[in-house]
């Protein structure tokens, strides 16, 4: 079978949708943690936001290390379920179980024991099981199809289902907590429900997609298997020598650090600046639903104009749409914030839909230049960026709250605390969009790959 035939062969729609469902499951773990762990610690456990933030940051250092190892493990795996699908399946159960445990810190623990408990469980989730799960999930994009348009569509469906989970969490969590009695009792009930949902949704892609047979995969890629398995250290060197890998890693870190900050500070921003905690759900809806609709047009745009160019232009426009968000946030004008969030969501959709496909192009770039495939390791950059970026963003939330003098047990907050929350939230919305413009200006991997292929023909 020729490379062209493999590229043209497309996955059935139901399999692409089934793949996307998995990201809804992972968000019932990671977005739940990113959005609500800090407020659980400050307002239920009554412990220091700054200390918790420091512990989360230390955990992220370990997390980044294990991500790269997991990518290498996937590359070296040969099982009946494939390279990535086995690890995705095996890790789904502990991801759900430890999410429940994290929000059930025993009340009898001393303050220091609570810190230790949170650090250990958070590290087990992030550095071990979620690492295993998310890298394997992302890698499946490259292993179950060689069709670039399929990859963009899979990334789009992934976002859509993730968005649905985020909206559910934003709208429903606060009400569920109150319905189950609030305090630790409420967190126990909610975390149990979310853990069950998490597990069920995570298992859907296991049955929805299959990896290409390994022999077919190697043949489709035009690879001599015996010559294409570099050692771990050699793989690291190859990745660090590739500028596109470094740019994508930087992009993920910036994007998800901003996401971690807005997720962590969102409930505080809605409560103390806008004056209504329930507005968090509407803010999430404004940032997600328009993007989900716009994603339907992303495959056509990227096919016509190219992935990098489409994303860069949309990010330039997106940076301008942040102006209403800033003005509305500073004046507590919820309508302006809402308008800005809708416009920002639409312009950010090309980046969301195309990113997985751009990573696959970067893997292709390394192969064209160096003669080696590093699919699992290169997809680990997405997990590093998501978890380290989100984790650092969540950790920064703790430092920001402490710096502003926030007191989770106080009935009212000082003006300094509210101002600090407000400015930090707004900057987390704007800065990642601006930095993305710079990154994509240099991320012309598609064009370079075309030139490299032409030289080899």
Image: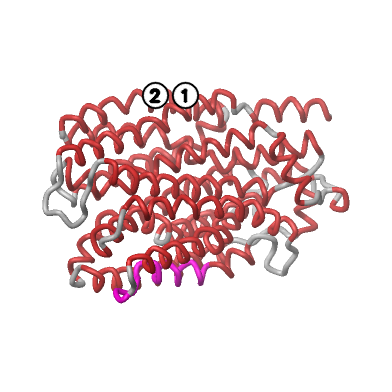
What residue do we see at 65% from left, 30% from top? Answer: 445
SS for callout 1: helix
Nearer to me, 149 or 286:
286
Residue 20 at x, y = what percent?
49, 55
Question: Residue 313 got which mark?
Answer: 1
- Left or right? Give the position of 199 relative to 447: left
SS for callout 2: helix
Relative height, residue 36 to residue 430 (above, below): below
Local crowd at mark 2 within 10 Å, few (<14), some, or many (≥20)?
some
What residue do we see at 26% from left, 44% from top? Answer: 283
What residue do we see at 45% from left, 39% from top? Answer: 255
User: Mark 2 and mark 1: span between their CA atoms?
Assistant: 6 Å
Nearer to me, 41 or 299:
41
Local crowd at mark 1 within 10 Å, few (<14), some, or many (≥20)?
some
Relative height, residue 266 to residue 21 (above, below): above
What residue do we see at 38% from left, 26% from top? Answer: 319
- Give the prevailing secondary structure in the magenta stretch: helix
What residue does disc 2 label? 317
- What residue range appears in magenta? 92-108
């Amino acid at each position: 079978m020729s490379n062209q035939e493999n590229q043209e062969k497309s996955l059935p729609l139901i399999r692409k949708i089934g793949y996307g469902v998995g990201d809804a499951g992972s968000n019932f773990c990671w977005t739940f943690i990113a959005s609500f762990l800090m407020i659980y610690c400050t307002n239920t456990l009554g412990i220091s936001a700054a200390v918790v933030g420091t512990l989360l940051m230390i955990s992220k250092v370990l997390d980044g290390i294990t991500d790269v190892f997991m990518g290498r493990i996937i590359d070296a795996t040969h099982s009946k379920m494939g390279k990535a699908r086995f690890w995705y399946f095996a890790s789904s159960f502990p991801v759900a179980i430890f999410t429940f445990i994290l929000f059930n810190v025993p009340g009898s623990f001393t303050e220091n024991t609570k810190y230790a408990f949170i650090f250990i469980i958070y590290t087990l989730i992030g550095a071990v099981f979620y690492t295993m799960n998310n890298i394997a999930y992302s890698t499946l994009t490259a292993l179950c199809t060689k069709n670039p348009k399929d990859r963009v569509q899979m990334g789009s469906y992934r976002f859509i289902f993730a968005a649905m989970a985020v909206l559910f969490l934003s709208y429903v969590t606060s009400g569920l907590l109150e319905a189950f009695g609030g305090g630790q009792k409420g967190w126990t009930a909610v975390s149990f429900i979310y853990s069950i949902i998490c597990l069920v949704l995570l298992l859907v892609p296991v049955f929805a997609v299959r990896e290409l047979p390994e022999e077919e995969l190697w043949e489709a890629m035009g690879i001599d298997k015996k010559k294409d398995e570099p050692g771990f250290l050699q793989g690291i060197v190859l990745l660090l020598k590739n500028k596109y890998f470094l740019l994508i890693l930087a992009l993920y870190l910036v994007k998800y650090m901003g996401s971690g900050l807005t997720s962590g500070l969102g409930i505080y921003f809605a409560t103390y600046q806008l004056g209504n905690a329930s507005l968090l759900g509407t803010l999430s809806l404004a940032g997600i639903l328009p993007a989900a609709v716009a994603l339907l047009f992303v495959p056509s745009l990227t096919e016509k104009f190219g992935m990098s160019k489409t994303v860069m232009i949309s990010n330039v426009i997106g940076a301008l749409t942040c102006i209403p968000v800033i003005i509305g946030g500073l004046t507590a004008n919820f309508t302006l914030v809402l308008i800005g969030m809708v416009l920002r969501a639409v312009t950010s959709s090309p980046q969301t839909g195309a990113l997985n496909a751009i990573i696959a192009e970067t893997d292709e770039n390394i192969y064209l230049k160096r003669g080696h495939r590093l699919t699992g390791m290169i997809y680990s950059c997405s997990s590093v960026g998501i978890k380290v970026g989100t984790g650092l963003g969540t950790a920064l939330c703790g430092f920001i709250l402490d710096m502003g003098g926030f007191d989770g047990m106080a009935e009212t907050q000082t003006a300094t605390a509210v101002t600090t929350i407000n400015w930090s939230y707004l900057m987390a919305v704007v800065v990642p969009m601006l930095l993305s413009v710079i990154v994509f200006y240099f991320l012309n991997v598609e064009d370079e790959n075309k030139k490299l292929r032409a030289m080899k023909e």
